Amino acid sequence: MINCPSCGAALPVRGFGVPYTTCHHCQALILRQGQSVEMVGKVAVVPDDISPVQIGTRFRLGAEDFVAAGRVRWAWSGGSWNEWLLFSAAGRSHWLGEAMGMYMLTAECPDALVDPQVVRFAQGADLAVGQTISSGTTRFAVTDIKRAECLGGEGDLPFPAHSGRTMTNVDLRGPSGEALSLQRDAEGTSAWLGTWHELADLNPSSLRELEGWSLPSGFPGARA
Amino acid sequence: MKRVGSRARTIECPACGGTLEVRAAGWSVSLACRYCGSIVDVSRPEVQIITAYKRAEASFALELGARGELFGQEWQVIGALKRRDALYRWQEFLLFNPYLGYRWLVVCDGEWQFGTMLLDRPAEVKKGVSWRGTVYRRQGQPQTTQTEFVIGEFYWRVARGDKAEASQFERGDEVLSQELVDGEETWTQLVPVDGDDIQATFAPNRRRQPRAKKPQGALSFKSDYGRERDDLPMMFAAAFGAAIMTLLAMVLIAGPVERASTQISAPYLTTLEGHKVGTLTVRRPWQFIRVRAQGAYFDNHWVDLDYSLVDQATGQSIDSYGLVERYSGRDSDGPWTEGDRRADTLVGRVPAGTYDLYVNAQAHSWPVDAPPPSTDAWADAATIDVAIEAETGALPWGNWFTLVVLLFTVPCVITWNRWKHHFS
């Protein structure tokens, strides 16, 4: 257990080795380095939404277990969406994108960063819708480019989720529905590869309780 | 740490001030006001108006917020659209459950379908597409569809007039629907659902479902896409012949005319129940009965009229619905008026027999029912007077003109396209 350097509240240590965490009492953004904790700013409260996921929600896909440790809310000209930071039991980090009631579970995909067009994108050049890039043996076509702005964050985070922080997100599609996204921000460019799922496919537990709704059949913990 | 979700967020419509629920807060991008139809951006905490309208289209088959169970799961209606293509009009309802995401209910000609968006794209094969090992055959040519009205909330930027290129692929009674908007495609699987199930679970407004208005004869041209080029003169001849034959048949079938009339005073917020208009006798095996309602002068009000034709012999009733309405106001474009104080309702295929016609009536004021705006002199009137006249032997002129338009649409479009290509 550590204490918030700003308000003194006890903060859970989830031990996933990401540098930033937020205080759910005073919204302090805290940088953790070994035993030292330092307040580096404030995060905006994530606007209340209908998401059934919360920090601590567990998922299982195939033989792999995941737990939600943090979230960032991004907005773009066409709306806003949540990116949940998940950690697998093996300690790898994943992003779970939540949009249109569907979920894209992604893992980092450094292979995609070696394509020459992605290298130029990482240096600041633009990509265009329809352009193709290759990652390993798969060819991906750009379907969507968004300029996104951070609306707030909570929990553990790999970067400081100040509101107003911006990134460029490029979505690409593979021939069999594989989804690749490239994210470029002030600190660099990363590539994430994943697939779309419905929430039930991810075998979620410890979901948030939503007033007026009961867990549907097929979810762990649902009333028969 | 357990957080219990807050109640549905409410916002105030920036156009009309109505209180609106946001049921999928954070996921919904646009919301069309159920009172005034204005479209509002709800994607950010600060609500912004996108397009202002004066009046919402209220007559949807399902109510916003209605909940029901389909295939063992609970769903809530959060959005409703009226859409059309060259031949059909239909309604679509966006269903929501925060744990399950979104689904669709589509109703056309009284037939209901339940839609699920596909996460995996079907592959193109000869004459159709293949999805999860099954081939679906293409039905007709791609159609341009247009959104006419929207109310409720949606996870995309919705607007009246939105266009999409739609194609359908069928296997038995299951349909895969492809829609293309600005090069982005979505696929939806549609399966039939029993209208009685919908009735039982969502308690829809049955009288407001789009009815099968179009004669089946015209639709046979639709399934013949691809053969139009050779069949054009035949199509014109068949269209002309069918129009004349139908007109003759209508005149022959219409039969003798009988009339009944009455005057009613429709009260506000309570229903005038079971007022008898009169007795009518249908002497042919079946006839059309037309019911005309004419409201006295009123403004910014409407009157719902529910008619029941009760067979004296069997006690069975045939129900239908009329609406007299008038609205006006002033905006930046100057004064405007909408609606009609007269309403014609045509009841088709009334079998031979003697009928008592009853009417239930209820008046409403616009934009809100209570309290009535005190500045409006007409709002203080306790009732609205409506004259009602019914007659047997009516001719369904509206249907006939629709038939003529439908019969000639396809050959005229083909002629136009050929003419265009000839000179380009």
Image (tube, rainbow, N blue to C red):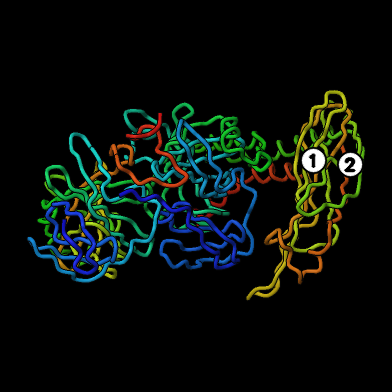
Q: Position of residue A146 (x, y in %)?
A: 30, 62
Is disc 2 surrounded by few (<14), some (14 to 19) or many (20+) residues within 10 Å?
A: many
Is disc 1 surrounded by few (<14), some (14 to 19) or many (20+) residues within 10 Å?
A: many
Tell me the distance, in whole angstroms, between the alpha carbons under discs 1 and 2.
Answer: 9 Å
Residue for point 36% across, 32% down = A218
User: Element under label 2?
Assistant: strand
Q: Is residue B45 visible?
A: yes
Going by the picture, which residue comes out furthest to the left? A34
Going by the picture, which residue comes out furthest to the top? B314
Q: Which residue is mark 2?
A: B277
Q: Position of residue A140 (x, y in %)?
A: 21, 50
Q: Earlier in the sequence, mark 1 or mark 2?
A: 2
Residue for point 60% across, 30% down = B196
| Front-lying residue, A110 or B172 | A110
Give the side of residue A43 with respect to residue B169, left or right.
left
Give the side of residue B40 with respect to residue A133, left or right.
right
Q: Chain of mark 1?
A: B
Q: Amino acid at mark 2?
A: Val
Q: Is residue A140 visible?
A: no
Q: Position of residue A166 (x, y in %)?
A: 26, 68
User: Element under label 1?
Assistant: strand
Residue B307's label in the rendered image is 1
The reply to whether callout 1 and callout 2 are in contact (CB within 8 Å) is yes
Give the side of residue A52 with respect to residue A17, left or right.
right
Residue B398: which quarter of the image?
A: top right
Give the side of residue B104 with respect to residue B290, left or right.
left
Q: Chain of mark 2?
A: B
Q: Position of residue A60 (x, y in %)?
A: 23, 38
